[in-house]
Image (cartoon, rainbow, N blue to C red):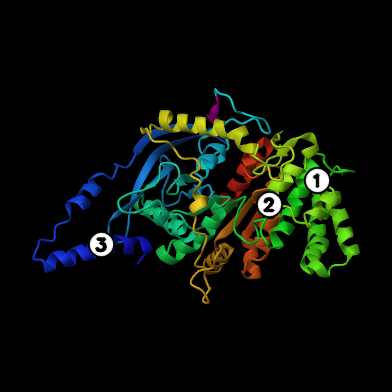
Amino acid sequence: MTAITRILLLPLVLLYCNAALAGEDNSEPAAQVEAKKTIPEPLHAVSQHRAKIGGSTVAYTAVAGQLLMKDEAGEPIALFGYTAYTKDDADPRQRPVMFAYNGGPGSASMWLHMGILGPQRTVIEDGGFASVGPFQRVNNEYSILDRADLVMIDPVGTGFSEAVGEAKGEDFWGVDQDIESVSNFIARWVTDNGRWQSPKYLLGESYGGIRSGGVAYELLQAHSLTLNGVILVSPYMDFAAGNAGLAMDLPYVNYFSTYAATAWYHKAIDDRPGDLQAFLREAERFAAEEYAPLLFKGASASAAERQRVLAGMERFTGISAEYWDRANLRVDESRFAKELLRERRQTTGRIDSRFVNDGLNHIGEQFTYDPFFPAVGPAFVATFNDYYREELGVDSDRKYITSGGLWKHWDNTHEQPGQTQYAKVPYANTAVDLAYAMVQNPNMRLLVQQGYYDLATPYGATEHFLNHLLIPERLRDNISVEHYEAGHMMYIHPASMERFKADLAAFIDAGAQ
C-alpha cells in the first residue's frame, strides 16, 4: 500500500466505524461528495496532422491533455498531463513507442518536445539571444515520429499536471514518489491504448536520468513491463558524483574536463591547441591521474605536489593557479562560470557553456544568472503555448508550468535496490536501479547522449556512472555513448541536432533487427 493510499484510506475507515457505532447510514459525507464534484474534467484534444520527416511524409494523430490517475482505492489523485503522437495506419503491436520527459526536478517536457522530438520545432539562433518576438516554429525534420510513436510526459507540478482530490503535490515530489507516479502513468497509458505488445523506450533528459533509472526498474518490478531501450540525454544519475560545491572530492574531478572544454571553446587558455579531442584526452588524464590523487591526499600532499597540480589546473582552465590555490583546488560550476571570463566582464552559461553574456556584479563569486535561459527560454515558451493551444487545440486558461521550482521541496531519499541496512539512502543514485533492470532484462539496451559543454551534468560525471554500473561485462555491449560539441540541450546546435536524430534513429532501428 502506497503512502498516498494510506493517507486517503485512514479518514474513510474512521468515518465508516463512527457511523456504524452511531447506527447511521454509511453514505459518503457531503464534503467528500462535493470534493469529487470539483475535480476538473481532464483536458482532451484530438487532432490530425501530417509532417515531413527525413524526406518522407508522416500522417499522425495527436492527443493532448490529461489522464486522470487514481490510487489503489479508486480515488482520484492526479490529472497527469501528456501529449501523445501516434502514426496513422501503423500496427500498434509492431510500432515502437517512446515515453519522454525532461528533468529539473520540476521541469516540463516542453524543451524536448519543441527542441528535437516533436513534429514542430522552435527556431533558435545557436549561441545568440532569441529574446524578442515574433518567434518562429517550423516543421521538425528531425522528429523521431518516423521511427516511433511518442508520448511526452509532464510529471505532477509541471505543465498542466496537478494533484487532485485529497492528494497534495508533495505526495509526488520526491525521488521515489516521482518514479512511482510516472511508472503508473506509463502502465496506464499502455493499457488504455492497447500497447502492451509494442516495443517500448524511455528517454529522459537531465534529472530525467534519475527518473529513468528508477522507472526502468519500477516498471519491471511493479508492472512486469519490460523496455527495449533507455535513452539518457545529458543525464544526472548520482547525487554524490554530480554535485560540485559539496564537501566531497569526487564531483570536482568529474567536472574538470568540462571546465577544460569550456576554457578551450572561449580561447581562455594560453597555447591553445587546435584539436579539441586531443586536448580533452589530456585533461581527462590529468584529472584522473594527478588532480584526483592530490585531492585524496589532502593535507598529506607535499607542497611540490600541490604546486605541480595547480600549474596543470591553470594550463587546462585558464584560471590562475593562485585563484585555484585560494579556492583549495575546488571550484563549483557557478564560480567557474563567473571567474573564467571575469576580465571580459562576461559570464558563461551553465546549461550550455558556449553561451555568454554580460556579467552582473563584477566582483561577485557566484554567477547571478545563467545566460542560456534568457537566450532561448522566451522562444520555447512562446512557440510551445502557441502550438499547444492554437494547433493542438488545448483549451485552457491555466498557465503551462515550464519549471515549478519543485527541487526546493524535493524528497531526495531513495529506496535503493539491494540496500538492506537502511530503509532509504539519503541521496539518490539510480544508476543502481538501472543496473538491476539491465541484469534482469539483459536484452534492454542503453544509449547515452552527452554534450561536452554541459556544466549542469558534465560528461565526466556521466562517464563515472557508466564505469561504475554493476553489470556483467557482456552487458556492456548493450551500451552506446555519443558525444556532441554542444551543451546540455545539444539539439539546439544545428550540427548536433542532425547527429542527435541519426544516433537516436539508429538505436531504435537496431532494436528492430
Residue 11: mark in rendering: 3
Report the residue at 54% width, 50% height from top.
Answer: 204
Name the kind of residue labelled 2 in the image. Answer: Pro
Magenta segment: 135-139
Q: Secondary structure at mark 3?
A: helix
Principal secondary structure, stretch drawn in magenta:
strand
Residue under pointer 2: 458
**Is 324 left or right of 450, judged from the image as shown?**
right
User: Is tag 1's residue or tag 3's residue first in the polypeptide sequence?
Assistant: 3
Residue 378 visible from this viewpoint:
yes
Q: Quadrant of residue 289?
A: bottom right
> Does 259 sit above or below residue 53?
below
Work out how far the residue at label 1 is from the one at label 2, CA to CA, in angstroms: 16 Å
Residue 276: mark in rendering: 1
Q: Nearer the viewer, mark 3 or mark 2?
A: 3
Q: Secondary structure at mark 1?
A: helix
Q: Nearer the viewer, residue 129 or 433?
A: 129
Q: Secondary structure at mark 2?
A: loop
Name the kind of residue labelled 3 in the image. Answer: Pro
Q: Position of residue 486 (x, y in %)?
A: 69, 42
Specify the quadrant that holds the C terminus.
bottom right
**Is 207 left or right of 395, judged from the image as shown?**
right
Residue 196 visible from this viewpoint:
no
Work out how far the residue at label 3 is from the one at label 2, CA to CA, in angstroms: 47 Å
> Does 138 sit above or below residue 42?
above
Work out how far the residue at label 1 is from the one at label 3, CA to CA, in angstroms: 63 Å
Q: Nearer the viewer, mark 1 or mark 3?
A: 3
Q: Is residue 346 magenta?
A: no
